Image (cartoon, coloured by chain):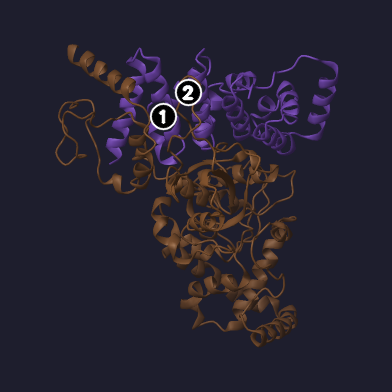
Amino acid sequence: MELGRLEYLQALVTEFQVTDSTEAKEQVLANLANFAYDPSNYEYLRQLQVLDLFLDMLSEDNESLVEFAMGGLCNLCLDKTNKEYILEANGVEPIINCLSSSNEETVVSAVTTLMFLTTPRSRAQTTALPVVECMLRFSLSANKRLSNLASIFLQDYCSPPQLEEARNLSKHTAVGIPLPKD
Amino acid sequence: MAGVRKERLKLEKIFKIMKPNPHLFPASCQGAVESNKVFPTHFFSRLSTPPPGSLSCSSSDLWPRPFTSSVALLWTCSGPQCLGERGSELSPGLEVYTINLESRYVLIQGVPALGVMKELVEQFALYGAIEEYHALDEYPAEQFTEVYLIKFKKLQCARVAKKKMDERSFFGSLLHVCYAPEFETVQETREKLQDRRKYIAKATNQRDCFVLKKIEGPKKTASKNSEQDCPWSTSGSHVARNWDPSCFTSSPGVSHNIAYPSGNQNQSLLSPYYDNNCAEIPGYFGENTSLTPSVHPGGHAPPASLMQQRMVPAYNGIDRFLPRTTHLQERKRKREEGNKFSLIGTSEDNTEVVIGPQLPEIPKVDMDDESLNTSATLIRNKLKEVADSVSTSVEKPESSSAKPLVKQRRRI
């Protein structure tokens, strides 16, 4: 059974690589991202370098691919091994970039992923000043999901000095990371 | 090379003409466990010929549709893999389910305006305890239909209910069920994320030491729930046993498993009384990060009477050999242990909105009989006096009894 599962996932990845059809890529990526929800698949996904695939897709122009890849990362990044892998691969930066996406799901997944990826070593990056400032703005959003997540980020992952610094920054700058369109 | 190209074209054709079939998904979801036995292999080497014993389709069918999301469902035992109504703009129907999309709140559209709220709630209560429900009068609805919001006590129940009830006919109308995370409070979202964290930690046997968590004492209800560590889809068989529309209780078959493993991550924060075995108890460990008061996600703890009922089976093997007073003292000790590691968590249990009779805070042990309760209270008070003076000698046998109790739960 385990061999069959690996084969199946391998087939998905192969299909993603060889197909020229955008729709096919989206479907495959969505499938892989949904598989990433189940921890029993993690070993195979790592073996098949799906984590790298997700990270690579974050810089695509296709909004759907970014959304699905970001969702996939959100699903699997809580696993310790996956987390370390993503951090080692400098995955935080492209995820932070996703905060400025106009796609609601992408942003929401990015906020959650940053929280999940926060470790003592990575927190300097995941809670960097621009990120905290962005979360401050998100926490005021009319989008309840986004504001909830941003509030949790600020309350649970940021220290009071960080919050203070970000608030001061907000006062002085007018340009920030835009809120996603609903 | 030509063979590969032929296969690729065939697969592309599958992708292009295939649209997510909402009527297909629920069946596939339900078959998530059974389908593990039917294991399609060799998708790509034998596209034209189904292997023997495979899914029953004619060879002219688009078998085995390896890339349908419904087939993807065959491979996962957990998580809401059904594609829902919220697709991306570019590919309608495609959806990636993350913890952010899921919620204890479910929105039900298409309910016929026939005054069937009670029946609707009863139907959904089959899948787990419901905390709140009400009609959403302002929500846009089709003519002659209404929209309802139901809040389950457990995310897992909401998952099952959504899967089972979505696209189901109800009084002649087709229901449309989706998650509604926008109704969550910040705290509910926080708990949801923490539960997901715990689940992953347990499923992958890992400890996440970074986020400081406040751990509440293990709830006794976990004793029953730990027995149910099985794929969620099989919980359907347990659900029907003891559902209650007024919903106090969580059906043990549903309130378990995926969302509520305690995870080894708790271990470092537990007292010496609890070893690895104890950390395996799924369920109601409240968990929180350092900056926030802990709130118990499983604070949906069943009433004391049911706690008592659930505790008894786990104690059965030991009951014969330990005097009853020892159990009472052990519960007291465990409560005290729990209080050591929680902040406001325990008290927050009482702020949970629960439909049904209010739980009395005291007595902790409810014998369903006034005289018995009085006796229990008297005994408890007496024990308290005794325990204070004889604490050391009593603790040791209790702590040793904790381990076999935990082990017993795990075996069952």
- Whether the residues at callouts 2 and 1 have beta carbons within 8 Å, the answer is yes
Q: Chain ID for label 2?
A: A
Residue B232, image x, y percentages: 43, 51
Task: From the viewer's perspective, tell me whether residue B334 is left or right of residue B47.
Answer: right
**Residue A36 at x, y percent in the picture:** 45, 34
Residue B378 in sight in this render: yes
Q: Which circle marks residue A119 in the picture?
A: none
The tag earlier along the polypeptide, 2 or 1, is 1
Which residue is tagged 1? A32
CA gap, disc 2 and disc 1: 9 Å
Subunit bearing disc 1: A
- The answer to which quarter of the image holds residue B363 is bottom right
- Against A70, residue B176 (above or below) is below
Element under disc 2:
helix
The residue under the point 40% across, 35% down is A43
Query: Label 2 belongs to which residue?
Result: A54
- Chain displayed in brown: B
Question: Please, is residue A85 above or below residue B161 in the view?
Answer: above
Q: Considering depth in this image, is B64 or B150 the residue closer to the camera?
A: B150
Q: Callout 1, which amino acid?
A: Leu
Residue type at mark 2?
A: Phe
Residue at position x 23%, y 25% in the image: B44
Density class for disc 1 (Cα within 10 Å; few <14, some 14-19, many ≥20) is many
* Quarter of the image where one finds residue A136: top right
Residue A45, horizontal then vertical, whole percent:
40, 31
- Residue A49 visible to an observer of this rendering: no
* Residue at screen point 23% across, 28% down: B62
- Residues beneath discs 2 and 1 located on the same chain: yes
The quarter in which the N terminus of chain B is drawn is top left
Q: Which chain is purple?
A: A
Residue B300 is situated, as x and y percent measured from the top left of the image, at 62, 59
